[in-house]
Image (cartoon, rainbow, N blue to C red):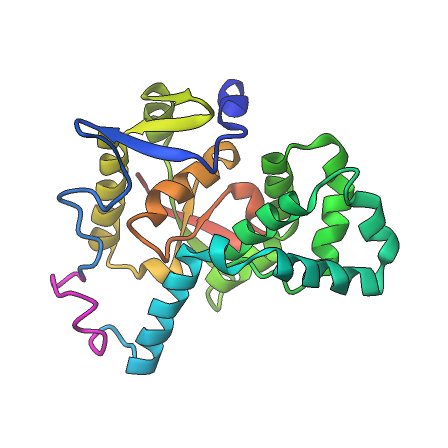
Amino acid sequence: MKNKRNIWRGFTQNVSYTGENGLFSSPLEGVDVRRTDEGESKTKNFWDNGYSASEYIGRILKHTAIRNIDDLFDYSDVNKYIEIVAAQNITLVDNIIPDFVSVAEIRYILSNLLRENVSIRDIVYIFEKINDYAEESSRDDLLDKIRVSLARHISKPFANDEGIIQAIAISDKTYDSMFDNSHDVDNIIRIDGTIAEKIVKKLMKSIKTLKIDIDNIIILAPLEIRHVVYVILSKFLPDIRVAANEEISNEYTLEIIDEI
């Protein structure tokens, strides 16, 4: 897999799906990601799924915020976080902005963390890691390294009382099919729509067969394509969590319950 790593670098924000009718980004035909095991719509039966009305509304608002994070998290928000860091360590800010990273790149990193529900509350620590890695990293490599540094924060929400994190892994076969059937034009990865459809259908079949709650598991993908897999799956499953093995803290035990 190492020989393919750099192919994906720099493209993880630009993923589209190609089918007979060209590019598309709406849910794939024949894939209904809103159904429970009994075939009932979650949007009409949130009581049966264990949510109160306020909890369900909260989830909808959360999904909306994630979908529109680029509009909601603007430069004024970024500047507030920079001010927080500067108040504690002005040298840290002066050292990395603008010589190593721009404010736009800071926004890119923070918005991507927020999009995947990674807390940026410990913003000083995040800036320290940017300072550690920025000199020799592209922004996508930098984001990967920061996520690895935040492994404990990423892992904790998915660990059960025994410290076990359950995961469905992307198989080598699926990895190869994504790579072999994709191409890039003008720095945009174009993935065959049939490949994306197969991945989503396999995942939904696995979840249904195992009778598991998607909120309590992660999808495990190689670090070099983790973000690409997230972009694909989040189009259809807004709550999906995709992590790389390197992002799982050693404090927890990783249990792979299936492969797709």
Please state which of residues 57 and 105 is positioned toward the viewer in this rendering: 105
Q: Is residue 143 magenta?
A: no
Rendered view: 66 above or below 229: below
Q: Position of residue 106 (x, y in %)?
A: 65, 48
Q: Is residue 46 magenta?
A: yes
Rendered view: 147 above or below 198: below
Residue drawn where x is 52% and y is 42% of the image: 245
Q: Position of residue 57 (x, y in %)?
A: 32, 75
Which region shows up in magenta?
Answer: 36-48
Q: Is residue 209 left or right of residue 132?
A: left
Q: Position of residue 144 (x, y in %)?
A: 59, 41
Asked whether residue 15 appears in the rendered view, the answer is yes
Rendered view: 212 above or below 181: below
Q: Name the chief secondary structure element in magenta.
A: loop
Query: Which quadrant of the rendered structure holds the C terminus?
Result: top left
Q: Position of residue 166 (x, y in %)?
A: 41, 54
Rendered view: 157 above or below 218: below
User: In the rendered image, which quarter is residue 252 located in?
Assistant: bottom right
